[in-house]
Amino acid sequence: MRPAPRLVAAIALWVCAVGGGLVAIASYELRSGRAAEPRDRWPEDSSLSRSPDRPTLLLFAHPHCPCTRASFAELEWIASRAQDRLECWVVAVQPAGAPADWIPENLGTSLAKVRADADGVEAARFDAHTSGQTLVYAPDGRLLFRGGITGSRGHVGENAGRDAVMACARGERPALDSTPVFGCSLATP
């Protein structure tokens, strides 16, 4: 007995819808944001302080980007293992026009210093455009790494960005000096 043509068509439509949904989700998770193209040296006009004796990590964050939670989890993992070999900063961007309470008191990270960045002034100095953008600078101000520290949007776990930052903390040259960054635009209120 052959299945009714309507049943076959309904099953085919269902398979296409599920398949299309899975492709859309995977495409979103793997779509990186605009990468930073920072100068090779720490900007002289930055008001952020760079450590004179260990690498300094800057993570630029949009406080309301859901993907940023994964970046904070990775930062906690890195900071807990790097201990005193890495100075860690979260630069929380407050876009122009955002309310005064835009940046929550507890961003979800306890092992990094947090700095509010009104109107994204520091983000512009470092050419950061996407939440989760991480930059690591040597004590002499040379850029060692730029990119994301998550393997895809909103996912925690082993990834090339995390490995690169840990290499910098150990005083080694990272296998990759840049990785894709996954997150929301820093300019979006």
Image: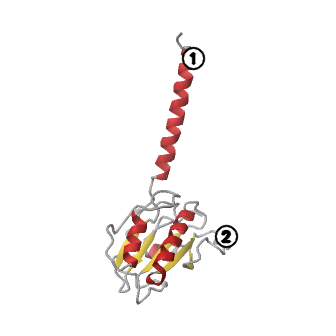
Please report the residue visible at 67 percent of the width from the left and 74 percent of the height from the top: 100
Q: Residues within 10 Å of mark 2 (few under 14, many from 20)?
A: few
Answer above or below: position of 7 versus 27. Answer: above
Please report the residue visible at 44 percent of the width from the left and 65 percent of the height from the top: 148
> Pointer 2: what residue?
99
- Amino acid type, residue under disc 1 in the picture: Arg
Q: Sequence order check: which comes first, mark 1 or mark 2?
A: 1
Q: How is the image coloured?
A: secondary structure
Please report the residue visible at 52 percent of the width from the left and 30 percent of the height from the top: 15
Could you say whether the residue bearing mark 2 is in a helix, strand or loop?
A: loop
Rendered location of residue 62, percent (x, y): 56, 67
Residue 38 visible somewhere in the drawing: no
Q: What whole-number distance in Å separates the C-alpha atoms at marks 1 and 2?
A: 54 Å
Rendered location of residue 149, percent (x, y): 45, 66
> Pointer 1: what residue?
6
Rendered location of residue 187, percent (x, y): 53, 65
Q: Quadrant of residue 136?
A: bottom left
| The C terminus sits in image quarter | bottom right
Could you say whether the residue bearing mark 1 is in a helix, strand or loop?
A: helix
- Amino acid type, residue under disc 2 in the picture: Pro
On residue 181, the disc is none
Answer above or below: position of 25 versus 159. Answer: above
Q: Residues within 10 Å of mark 1 (few under 14, many from 20)?
A: few
Q: Nearer the viewer, residue 189 or 6?
A: 6
